[in-house]
Amino acid sequence: MRTAADMEYGERCIISEVDSAHPSSRRILEIGFTPGQEIELINKSIFNDPLAFSLRGTLIAIRRNEAGCIKLA
Amino acid sequence: MNEQVIEKTSLITLVGPPNSGKTTLFNYLSGQNFKTVNYPGATVEYSICKLLGKFNLNANILDSPGIISLIPNSPDEKVAVESLYCHPQLGIPDIIIVTVDASQISRHLFLVKQLIEANFRVLIALTMTDMLQKKGLHISEKELGRELGCPVVKIDGRTGFGVNELIVQAEQSIEKSQREIIKQPIIFNENIDKQRLIKIYNEIAEIEKKVIHETITPRKIEAANKKLKIFNEPIGKQNRNSIDYTTLRIDRFLLHKVWGLVFFFIIMAVTFTSIFWLAQPIMHFIDESFGYLAKAVHDSIGVPWIGDLLSSGIISGMGSVLVFIPQITILFLILGILEDTGYLARGAMLIDKPLSKIGLNGKSFVPMLSGFACAIPAMLAARTITNKKERYLTIFIIPLMSCSARIPVYALLMAFLFPPEKAWIGGLMLAGVYIFSIVSSVIIAGIINKFSARIIKAQDNSSFILELPSYRVPKLRVVLTNTYYSVKVYLKKAGPIIFFLSIIIWGITYFPNSSPKVDTNNLNKEEIGQLERAERLSGSYASHLGKIIQPVMSPIGMDWRVGVSLISAFAAREVFVSSLALIFKVTGNNASIQSSIVEAMRKAEIGNTGRKLFTPATICGLIIFFMFSLQCISTIAVSRKETGSWRIPILQVIIFTSFGYFMTFITVNGLRAVGIN
């Protein structure tokens, strides 16, 4: 299954689920990465990590590893 | 006004997500008259103030670090959440004012919903409604208030619009609350059902639909956008939550995989070089003024010891350090500008991956950068780091960042190495010292990370989740005021220490042999003065003390006089300069204090051997010593407080100071071996 870590520049996707097993999952939900929400990959830092997503009208940077727990529809 | 309210001082707590305009509102309510100052990077402590008299409400306002949820994730969030549930002195707040960015309500209402669910009495201050207007949208505060069941007031913390109404509303809510039974707030814990979080977000989405309306027809916006040549997107749900276009465009460069890093290094380089270049002329002026003042005081006071105390002790001592205020001011100013534009968060993102390789976090970037101003606010700023191990490691290496207290020392030593007409080489060298301090701290962090199991003793999930705020043109007034307060805090902290130590060092170098007998045959007045000073010093308390530490100083090519200065530098590093000025008895016989010290240093000899005390080798050695050794008592105390035990501060003192001594030993003897002396 594709996750937010696999997204390309400028790609828009809808979140289907956030993997509860990941230790950062609660914070990721709290900051607004909720199922049904659309996200867009805006930037990748050097070494492609962290990734910056456009979410609910703001930019949020999260690590690639953390983006991996955001499953896409 | 209700009598009860007059009797009792109410407590209003300000809460809000980061970048929601909370601190701006707090500054407006307090008139900048609060107890703790916002250091670069974050509000890390609570700030508390009395509400300004003009609002006619007897209340204390409490500001705390920004939070996005009532379940804290890092020590600074913990401070904020705990201040809500049980502030140690003030108890539970009578009312909570939550700042909510109107253009971000889909995220910012999350905290509001949690606060209401937890039984807190909430009043919403809706900020940045102008941003929403630019998007052609309008938010109805009445409808929002009805949906949430709490009062909502639109405000602008920069102009003060709506703030009076906010306070009136707060007063009404407090009065109302006193007639009701107080419900104990519910504490949320980490094991919260994640479905509940999702449910809150779904409810917010419903509310958002009801309260936000379009002000103008889509066609008009399209036309307006075309005129401005901005992108034309179909108006609708997406546009509500689109990011500021300028921000996206700037980030295309500043967050670019390659260019982003280039810009990062350019910005850092410009920051540090401008500290030296811009400050030069002002420093020169201050330096000469103090030199002139010292000479005037010395010549006009009849009683020798009082004249000496005032000119050599107090004026030269204070002046030798105050000279560096311009550099420190510029450093604070640049940090403030970088923070206000929104770049610091980007810097943290760019550097996250490299830093994670050595056991740090992107969020270590701001504390490390603040460390170049002062280690104390830097250690507090490390509270934003979620992971305990990364936080402790950041605190561990912060003393290696070249703090502003070291600027006076380096500047003096550089002035010794390079004559005034070649000051630019000194500037470059100073930049080199900064680069070297960064490189060495990275290496040391890497080494300590390897042994982290033994040294740091903490394991946690490593995480980096950070909001990148929209770029803004920095508000000069805000940046200048913050810089002013930061410099004031610096002076308040360092000033008294330098003052008292200057007097103590003056005392131990002047007494007990205060009026020595010297052979005055065939000597002019100035030569007699010099001879007397030398005689007085060799019989002084300082010299007795110095004999004890001589064995430690000899291997690194220095004598007891440097030793005494180094010991006094443990109170604050910049005292090193003032104590050198005192020990080598610099009076205002030269135009500027700095050049007088340098001149005295050039003349100084080791004992009566005729060998020069200060040579390029020993000066380089001193620079190295100051780069590594942990010589600041306040830093040690804060490190103890922030890590909760003596373990880390003691290790820091032992490792850094012995390493500094060892490196100095190698440098001095190495340089001598290759013939530089």
Image: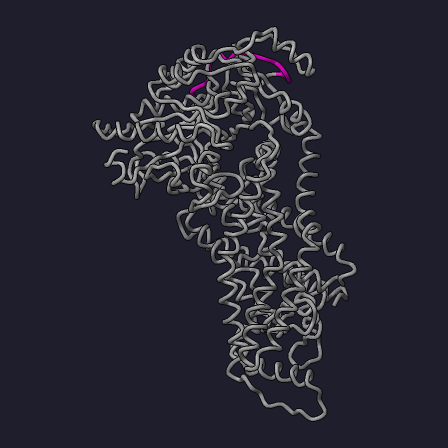
Residue shown at 63% from the left, 46% from the top: B438
Q: Which residues are magenta?
A: A8-21
Q: Is residue B85 above or below residue B293?
A: above
Q: Is residue B473 above or below residue B408?
A: above
Among the 4 quarters of the image, the one containing residue B175: top left
Residue shown at 56% from the left, 86% from the top: B515
- The answer to whether residue B237 is visible is yes
Q: Dividing the image into 4 quarters, which one contains the N terminus of chain B?
A: top left
Numbered disc total? 0
In the rendered image, residue B85, in percent from the top left (x then y), is placed at: 31, 34
In the image, taking residue B234 as reference, residue B50 lies left or right, namely: left
Among the 4 quarters of the image, the one containing residue B608: bottom right
- The answer to whether residue B432 is visible is no
Within the magenta stretch, is there residue A12? yes
**In the depicted view, which residue is nearer to us: B538 or B658?**
B538
Among the 4 quarters of the image, the one containing residue B131: top right
Residue reaching furthest right? B421
**In the depicted view, which residue is nearer to us: B410 or B160?**
B160
Q: Dividing the image into 4 quarters, which one contains the C terminus of chain B?
A: bottom right
In the rendered image, residue B666, in percent from the top left (x then y), is placed at: 66, 61
In the rendered image, residue B437, in percent from the top left (x then y), is placed at: 63, 50
Within the magenta stretch, is there residue B150? no
